[in-house]
Image (spheres, rainbow, N blue to C red):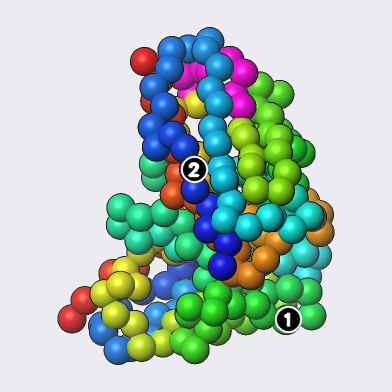
């Protein structure tokens, strides 16, 4: 059974860096087509933040690319998100997700979501 | 950026009825890379359909997807109470990947 578990601080101060980690169990992180982060602000829809492909090649939403970084740690079977210079607009539920169902597929495994609030 | 517009905003139907959800793209979706997700409160989104018409593993055959170009449809042939959720379409053929604003399905 493939499980994704996100972790990280639930409260981040404005202008600081948000850091989240997704731990994958039941599946080798190296075997997926790609992994990604998606967020949902309160009362809003889903927003793709970025993905990281095999060989560690990242791909970011251009609206966030100057502030976002996604990386993979194969030794820990984890991938991570860093979002710098956060503001209240970055308050959201952050989901980690993965694509295992094929190169023409989309996110078939998701974590439960981590609520991150940006506030002083 | 491809903007996805879903309609209707809310659909209220009885168990056993057919639900038809629409997703219209502002530009043609490359290679029909269009997915549909079911999202229930407090849960992770669940992939239903990928590549416009392919059911994901374990998805009941009452869910079906169709369309190409800019117009896509998710059909739930016989609604069941557990289908109460928000449904999102997503295109993943162009960057940035984008989602529609969602259609809420209510069961009477």
Q: Is residue B60 magenta?
A: no
The answer to which image quadrant residue B108 occupies is top left
Name the spot of residue A67 as percent of width and height, x first.
Answer: 46, 87
User: Going 71% across and 38% down the picture, which residue do you hit?
Assistant: B67
Q: Which mark is nearer the camera, 2 or 1? A: 2
Q: Does the magenta stretch include residue B76?
A: yes
Q: Which chain carries label 2?
A: B
Which label is found at residue A56?
1
Crowding near the residue tagged with mark 2, few <14, some 14–19, many ≥20 C-alpha atoms within 10 Å: many
State the image coordinates of residue A118 (x, y, percent, origin top left): 27, 75
Alpha carbon separation for disc pair 2 and 1:
33 Å
Instruction: Reply above or below: A20 against B100.
Output: below
Which of the labelled discs sits on residue A117, or is there none?
A: none
Range covered by the magenta-colored residues = B75-82
Horizontal side of B11 relative to A15 (left or right) equals right
Q: Residue at x 61, y 33 (%)?
A: B74
Residue at horizontal 69 percent and vertical 55 percent from the top: B29
Which structural element holds mark 2? Answer: strand
The quarter of the picture where residue B98 lies is: bottom right
In screen coordinates, is A98 left or right of A112? right
The percent position of residue A43, horizontal first and vertical second, equals: 30, 53
Q: Name the residue under label 2.
A: B6
Q: Residue at x 53, y 58 (%)?
A: B3
Q: What element carries label 1?
A: helix
Report in which chain the residue with disc 1 lies. A
Q: Is residue B91 visible?
A: yes
The image quarter containing residue A107 is bottom right
Quadrant containing the N terminus of chain B is bottom right
- The answer to whether residue A23 of the structure is visible from this angle is no
Q: Is residue B7 left or right of residue B1?
A: left
**How would you rate the neighbour count of disc 1 (Cα within 10 Å): few for under 14, some for 14-19, many for 20 or more?**
some
């Amino acid at each position: 059974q493939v499980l994704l578990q996100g972790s990280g601080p639930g409260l981040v101060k404005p202008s600081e860096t948000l850091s989240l980690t997704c731990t994958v169990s039941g599946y080798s992180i190296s075997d997926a087509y790609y992994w990604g982060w998606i967020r949902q602000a309160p009362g809003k829809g889903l927003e793709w933040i970025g993905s990281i492909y095999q060989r560690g090649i990242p791909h970011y939403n251009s609206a966030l690319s100057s502030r976002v970084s996604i990386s993979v740690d194969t030794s820990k079977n984890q991938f991570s998100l860093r979002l710098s210079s956060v503001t209240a607009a970055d308050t959201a539920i952050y989901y980690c997700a993965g694509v295992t169902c094929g190169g023409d597929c989309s996110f078939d495994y998701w974590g439960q979501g981590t609520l991150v609030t940006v506030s002083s | 950026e491809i903007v996805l517009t879903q309609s209707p905003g809310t659909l209220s139907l009885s168990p056993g009825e057919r639900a038809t959800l629409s997703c219209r793209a502002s530009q043609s979706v490359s290679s029909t890379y269009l997915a549909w997700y079911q999202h229930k409160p407090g849960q992770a989104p669940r992939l239903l359909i990928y590549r416009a018409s392919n059911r994901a593993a374990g998805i009941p055959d009452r869910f079906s997807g169709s369309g190409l170009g800019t117009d896509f449809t998710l059909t739930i042939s016989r609604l069941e109470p557990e289908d109460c959720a928000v449904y999102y379409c997503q295109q993943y053929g162009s960057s940035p990947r984008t989602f529609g604003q969602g259609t809420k399905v209510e069961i009477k």
